[in-house]
């Protein structure tokens, strides 16, 4: 199992303590799913492009999804034990296999 703590940015966005639920690693990113004390989920992705923290939902058992709106575009981030997919307005921008998870 991968031991990764939730970054401070997630606690700040959640407004309180959070705990790691799941971590996924790709060749270019580390994605940590964190939960607040009420069960709310947060998606944290760290890569060479920077960091992002978004509210998340769990679908299909082991898939986590987060969405953001930027300059009129909708970005959808999906991650599970097999792959990370990032879409902009329905078009795949990033598809990376997950190399480890836990």
Image (cartoon, rainbow, N blue to C red):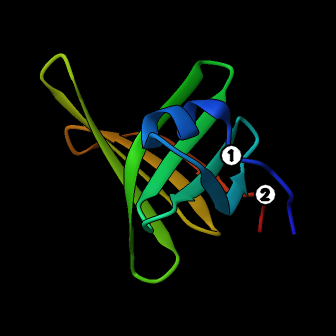
Indicate the secondary structure of the residue bearing disc 1.
Answer: loop
Asked if residue 43 lies left or right of residue 72, the reply is: right
What residue is drawn where x is 18% and y is 27%? 73
Find the distance from the CA under tag 1 to the CA under tag 2. 20 Å
Mark 2 surroundings: few (<14), some (14-19) or many (≥20) residues within 10 A: few
- Depth order, front residue of 9/25: 9
Whichever of labels 1 and 2 marks the residue nearer the N terminus, that label is 1
Whether the residues at callouts 1 and 2 have beta carbons within 8 Å, the answer is no
Mark 1: few/some/many CA within 10 Å (<14, 14-19, 20+) = many
Q: Is 95 placed left or right of 1 in the picture?
A: left
Instruction: Point out the frontmost of discs 1 and 2.
Output: 1
Establish if 53 lies above or below 73.
below
Give me the disc on residue 82. Answer: none
Q: Quadrant of residue 75?
A: top left
Which residue is found at the position 71% from the left and 35% from the top?
A: 28
User: Taking 33 as reference, is 57 left or right?
Assistant: left
Residue 11: where, in percent of width, then height? 56, 39
Q: Which residue in the rendered view is the most extreme toward the left? A: 72
In percent of width and height, residue 61 lies at 47, 83
Q: Residue furthest bottom?
A: 61
Q: Nearer the viewer, residue 52 or 98?
A: 52
The residue tagged 2 is: 99
Residue 41, above or below 89: below
Task: Write the residue at 40% across / 81% down.
Answer: 60
Query: Does residue 1 sit above or below 100 in this rendering?
Result: below
Question: In this orientation, which residue lies closer to the viewer: 77 or 21?
Answer: 21
The image shows residue 15 at horizontal and vertical percentages of 45, 40
Q: Quadrant of residue 64?
A: bottom left
Residue at the spot x=60%, y=18% of the render? 49
Task: Give the quadrant of the C terminus.
Answer: bottom right
Query: Circle 1 is placed at which residue position?
Result: 6
């Amino acid at each position: 199992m991968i031991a990764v703590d939730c970054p401070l940015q997630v606690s700040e966005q959640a407004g309180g303590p959070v705990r790691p639920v799941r971590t996924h690693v790709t060749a270019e990113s580390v994605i940590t799913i964190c939960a607040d004390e009420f069960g709310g989920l947060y998606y944290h992705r760290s890569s060479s492009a920077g960091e992002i923290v978004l509210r998340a939902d769990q679908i299909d058992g082991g898939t986590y999804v987060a969405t953001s709106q930027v300059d009129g575009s909708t970005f959808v981030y999906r991650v599970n034990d097999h792959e990370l997919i990032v879409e902009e307005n329905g078009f795949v921008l990033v598809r990376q296999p997950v190399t480890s998870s836990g």
